[in-house]
Image: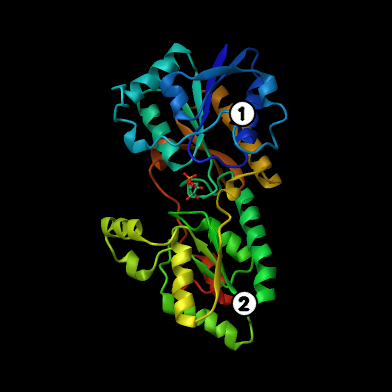
Amino acid sequence: MLRIGMLTSGGDCQALNAAMRGVVKGLAANVDELEVYGFENGYKGLIYGHYRLLTSSDFSGILTKGGTILGSSRQPFKLMRVPDENGLDKVEAMKQTYHKLNLNCLVILGGNGTQKTANLLREEGLNVIHLPKTIDNDIYGTDVTFGFQSAINIATDAIDCIHTTAASHNRVFIVEVMGHKVGWLTLYAGVAGGADIILLPEIPYDLDKVVDAIAKRSSQGKGFTILAVAEGAISKEDAALSKKEYKAKVAERKYPSVSYEIAAEISKKLGSEVRVAVPGHTQRGGSPCPYDRVLCTRLGAAAAKAIMDKEYGVMIAMIDNKTKRVPLGEVAGKLKTVDPNGQMIKEAKRIGISFGD
Ligand code: F6P
């Protein structure tokens, strides 16, 4: 009998269900007796023993379904060693649930924080396999994460829609794309949507340069400008502040986000109208795109093989279009960021896209 547990943790994204289906189908086709326990709402379910035994019907018809059939929640890694409000030791509680169910392995789907906790559980002696999920594409050690491509499609659609209205009204438009720490999604959607200016957390911007880029387009007879701005875009001035000072400044910000602040500043400098569009969580929603369905089916099947080979403590990554088992200890806690001097940025600059630097 093979007994596995599964959980989805952190912000959801498209293709979580597709990935779980891949794992279970990959096991069910090769193992005579299989029990799959689904933990509800991420690590919470593992801590508090909220789980259900899943059957094959739970995994049928979910390849195309967005969200997660298990539910998700954010359980910050830094609080994992801190007892809960009733004094419960969360790590011990997770271990107890795992041992009570006599699991052979826990399959954990999530982003960076989730991966750090998966690594902690590995260090505590549990068999874990991590699958790299996030629209941010910021997990170190894999070329791509699932959810990223689906989110690019949605953010690009948003920019495409804004393009037509911006052109009709001769307006400057900002489309705010998700990503507080990294700018992969903004970069890809910005390039795919033909944005004129792209602002990323990794490349602090100079507002004068942004304004110059808009003015240059006007002088060339182009009445509108599209900016793709990451949630975590930061000015050169703010990037020079300490983390603490920056946090305090953001807490005092009178705008809902950096995009509105940039819009107000551009408007003041150019005397023109600037509108902001925020697709927000739509970027994580809906059905996974075909690329993500294929990616997750492959990652899921590769995870099933790793379980059958009893090789645990790994993330199933996609590197050079091949699935690979990457030891969690080598990647947990590292972030994959956009290289400001990388080829894609240079090529984008070559065709005239401004990064405000
Ligand atoms: O990590 C995924 C992500 O969607 C980020 O791009 C975004 O900054 C953040 O989560 C939003 O978090 P929440 O869903 O908690 O608002």
Can I make out residue 73 in this image?
yes
Q: Which residue is mark 2?
A: 224
Task: Where is residue 55? Give x, y as percent.
Answer: 65, 18
Which element type, helix, strand or loop, lies under badge 1? helix
| Amino acid type at image mark 1 | Val
- The residue lying at 54 percent from left, 41 percent from top is 133
Q: Residues within 10 Å of mark 1 (few under 14, many from 20)?
A: many
Query: Would the CB of label 1 be found within 8 Å of ligand 1?
Result: no
Q: Is residue 224 above or below residue 191?
A: below
Task: Where is residue 96? Give x, y as percent.
Answer: 39, 16
Extreme bottom residue here?
A: 219
Task: For the N terminus, give its image quadrant.
Answer: top right
Can I make out residue 29 in this image?
no
Q: Residues within 10 Å of mark 2 (few under 14, many from 20)?
A: many
Q: Is there a contact, CB below 8 Å, between mark 2 and mark 1? A: no
- The residue lying at 49 percent from left, 76 percent from top is 267
Extreme right residue here?
A: 61
Q: Please state if 168 lies on the left or on the right of 219 as rendered.
A: right
Cα separation, mark 2 vs mark 1, equals 47 Å
- Quarter of the rendering containing residue 95: top left
Task: For the C terminus, give its image quadrant.
Answer: bottom left
- The residue lying at 65 percent from left, 65 percent from top is 162
